[in-house]
Image (cartoon, rainbow, N blue to C red):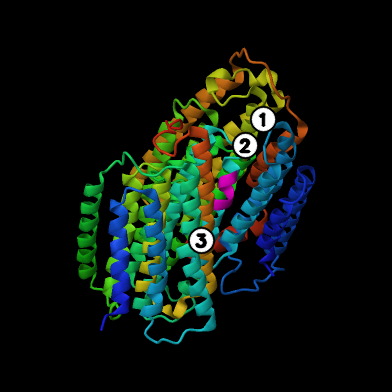
């Protein structure tokens, strides 16, 4: 029998590696949509007790909607409006990025095995995936120069942090109101970043973060 | 229902989007006054939290709420005239974001649940971003982009930190509600390793927002590009809110018996921030950036004082109050100068004493205050922090502290002299107006008044904020 949780986590890991190697921004947005859905599904299959309250069900459905549809939708519009197709000159090349992604993966397996946390059954994999996603998000933000890729890197970081939250903590103190607040902040954050991106594009005719370099000491 | 304190500005803020700007300005001022009234009521203990799982009225929170509320009244009075004299493209948006900013900051001061605190701090970033790029210049865009991205990533790390603290709770097998109040009662049972890891992430995360070096890179840009009322609010109120997040976690660490670890981290970050602030002030060509670096330095002093603890902790809390009052007054004066001369370059400004005599008084008094000279409160607070550090035998730290203060005094003095007395070929664009001067004067007077006569209730509140981790008020 195929373990659903593990397949979801493997898909998440693959999406991380794919995003490090993809040159086209549209593909990157689609990968983020997939990753968002997978990340929101993870806690559903981890919960061993199975009985979910009605509040929890509504929350998870909203979360899938926001992470899988709304945020990628906003990114899609941003990419369309600024009319750029691909990242031409990344700071770190694509092959090197994938290699770095694999190195991050090995590193997070190493960390997880050495932490000796008394994690519940099956949560080791979640922790590995979470650390990889987080670190890869950071890497993406540093390795790419386009502003939109930096937003995507931030989203990946946020996904990783969310996974760590689900992997490490018991669900007895999860308050859905609070988690919903976090999600809302993320959504509004991406919206505002999208608006600024649009304005940067209008002002500089480019969304490269290396072009505005007026402010410094 | 203490939640009204943040619900009121958020509701009126959203309402002003639909109103014309002339009416919106009045709503801004009225809301500020009502907010101050609610704050005073909460000080008198008339308001109790309805959702006590998420919110509570902690003494340190109330203190920062009062400072925020008072500054906001002054700034809204200033904005009243400021908005007429500058061409802001979207005035309703400006008013709306100012009010939302006040609302989210009030939410930070009242929240008791760590994640709610996190949500509120992240929300302050989001609602203040439009304030910075309200003028839509290229430099403002760049500043906003840096602000939103750096702060969001930084704050995301603080969320990770709070997850680790939750893990510390699980490993200790504690089944308590996750609020700071209840965490403090079970602090000794928490897993110390994960608590430490959590604190490191929290201090890096909220330290980014508070402007602690080396995570401060967004701060000078955002403060110099934002319109002056927004800069005053960023520096005088927002940085305190981020500090509150760190302080509450530091209290938890102290009760758990890890106070030395977290204190040393705070001292380290504090000293680095002081030095970075001092070094960049010398030779600064832009006076608003100079004020921003001075904020970094002062946040460093606050972190330093809290890290040392004891007597210095009392000084740190005084420093928060006086820094907010003096710095927002200075930013408002800087706004008058910017309106008058139309440039932020120190070299192109001269003779403020002749062209803007009444602004000069406020600017000069602010300069005296920010350099840590009497009769302003920063003199007392810096002195107390120094004495506190001596008591703890931190001689090298005190030496660095004094060095930073001297450097700042020299740097600020040079800039101030050349702006006040030099010559300029520029013509004055906008004359000074009483309504734009009153707020600066009020803030300065408040700082002097608090030096001469500290109301008992303020004194007790500071005492209540610090006594839980062993802060004292006498040598």
Question: Who's the residue at 54% across and 62% down the image?
Answer: A184
How many numbered discs sit on the rendered protein?
3
The dot on residue B336 is: 1
Give percent across and percent down for residue B357. Answer: 70, 23
Residue depth check, mark 1 versus mark 3: number of the one nearer the observer = 3
Image quarter hosting the N terminus of chain B? bottom right
- Which chain letter matches label 2? B
Residue wearing tag 3: A70
Question: Who's the residue at 68% across and 62% down the image?
Answer: B7
Q: Are marks 1 and 2 in contact (CB under 8 Å)?
A: yes
Is residue A97 covered in magenta? no
Q: Main secondary structure of the magenta part?
A: helix
- First to last magenta residue range: B126-130
Left or right for B362, reference B373:
right
Can residue B286 be seen in the rendering of this structure?
yes
Query: Within 10 angstroms of label 3, few (less than 14), some, or many (20 or more) residues?
Result: some
Q: Nearer the viewer, residue B220 or B297?
A: B220
What's the distance in space between the residues labelled 1 and 2, CA to CA? Answer: 9 Å
- Residue A115 lies, with reference to residue B158, above or below; the image says below
Give percent across and percent down for residue A13. Answer: 29, 64
Q: Nearer the viewer, residue B110 or A123?
A: A123
Look at the numbered disc 2 and give the secondary structure of its residue.
helix
What's the distance in space between the residues labelled 1 and 3, CA to CA? Answer: 43 Å
Query: Within 10 angstroms of label 1, few (less than 14), some, or many (20 or more) residues?
Result: many
Q: Nearer the viewer, residue B446 or A33?
A: A33
What's the distance in space between the residues labelled 3 and 2, CA to CA? Answer: 35 Å
């Amino acid at each position: 029998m195929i373990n659903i949780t593990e397949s979801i986590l493997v898909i998440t890991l693959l999406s991380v590696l794919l995003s490090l190697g993809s040159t086209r921004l549209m593909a990157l947005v689609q990968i983020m949509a997939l990753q968002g859905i997978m990340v929101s599904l993870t806690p559903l299959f981890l919960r061993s007790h199975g009985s979910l309250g009605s509040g929890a069900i509504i929350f998870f459905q909203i979360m899938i909607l926001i992470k899988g549809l709304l945020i990628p939708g906003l990114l899609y519009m941003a990419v369309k409006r600024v009319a750029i197709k691909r990242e031409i000159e990344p700071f770190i090349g694509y092959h090197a990025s994938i290699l770095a992604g694999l190195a991050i993966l090995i590193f997070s397996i190493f960390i997880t095995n050495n932490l000796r946390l008394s994690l519940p059954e099956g949560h080791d994999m979640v922790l590995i995936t979470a650390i990889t996603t987080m670190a890869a998000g950071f890497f993406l933000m540093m390795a790419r120069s386009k502003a939109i890729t930096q937003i995507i890197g931030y989203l990946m970081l946020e996904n990783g942090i969310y996974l760590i939250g689900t992997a490490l903590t018991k669900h007895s103190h999860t308050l859905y109101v609070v988690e919903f607040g976090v999600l809302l902040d993320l959504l509004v954050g991406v919206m505002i970043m999208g608006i600024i991106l649009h304005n940067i594009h209008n002002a500089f005719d480019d969304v490269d973060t290396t072009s505005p370099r007026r402010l410094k000491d | 229902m203490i939640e009204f304190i943040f619900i009121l500005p958020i509701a009126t803020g959203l309402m002003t989007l639909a109103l014309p700007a002339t009416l919106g300005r009045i709503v801004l001022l009225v809301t500020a006054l009502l907010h101050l009234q609610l704050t005073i009521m909460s000080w008198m203990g008339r308001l109790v939290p309805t959702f006590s799982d998420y919110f509570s009225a902690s003494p340190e929170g109330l203190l920062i709420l009062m400072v925020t509320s008072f500054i906001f009244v002054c700034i809204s009075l200033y904005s009243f005239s400021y908005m007429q004299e500058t061409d802001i493209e979207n005035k309703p948006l400006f008013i709306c974001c100012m009010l939302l900013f006040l609302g989210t900051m009030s939410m930070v001061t009242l929240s008791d649940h760590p994640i709610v605190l996190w949500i509120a701090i992240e929300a302050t970033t989001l609602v203040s971003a439009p304030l910075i790029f309200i003028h839509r210049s290229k430099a403002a865009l760049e500043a906003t982009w840096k602000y939103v991205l750096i702060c969001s990533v930084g704050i995301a790390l603080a969320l990770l930190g709070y997850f680790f603290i939750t893990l510390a709770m699980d490993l200790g097998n504690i089944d308590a509600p996750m609020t700071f109040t209840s965490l403090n009662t079970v602090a000794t049972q928490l897993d110390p390793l994960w608590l430490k890891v959590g604190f490191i992430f929290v201090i890096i995360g909220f330290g980014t927002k508070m402007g602690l070096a080396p995570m401060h890179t967004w701060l000078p840009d955002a403060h110099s590009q934002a319109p002056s009322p927004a800069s005053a609010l960023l520096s005088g109120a927002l940085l305190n809110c981020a500090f509150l997040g760190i302080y509450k976690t530091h209290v938890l660490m102290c009760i758990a018996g890890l106070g030395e670890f977290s204190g040393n981290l705070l001292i380290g970050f504090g000293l680095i921030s002081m030095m970075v602030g001092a070094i960049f002030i010398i030779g600064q060509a832009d006076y608003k950036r100079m004020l921003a670096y001075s904020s970094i330095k002062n946040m460093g002093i606050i972190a330093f004082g809290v890290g040392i603890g004891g007597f210095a902790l009392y000084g740190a809390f005084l420093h928060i109050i006086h820094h907010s009052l003096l710095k927002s007054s200075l930013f408002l004066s800087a706004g008058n100068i910017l309106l008058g001369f139309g440039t932020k370059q120190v070299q192109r400004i001269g003779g403020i004493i002749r062209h803007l005599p009444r602004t000069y008084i406020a600017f000069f008094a602010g300069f005296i205050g920010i350099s840590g000279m009497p009769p302003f409160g920063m003199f007392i607070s810096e002195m107390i922090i120094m004495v506190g550090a001596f008591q703890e035998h931190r001689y090298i730290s005190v030496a660095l502290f004094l060095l930073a203060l001297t450097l700042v005094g020299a740097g600020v003095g040079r800039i101030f002299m050349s702006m006040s007395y030099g010559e300029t070929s520029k013509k004055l664009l906008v004359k000074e107006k009483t309504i734009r001067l009153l707020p600066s004067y009020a803030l300065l007077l408040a700082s002097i008044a608090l030096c001469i006569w500290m109301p008992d209730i303020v004194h007790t509140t500071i005492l209540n904020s610090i006594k839980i981790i062993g802060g004292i008020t006498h040598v």
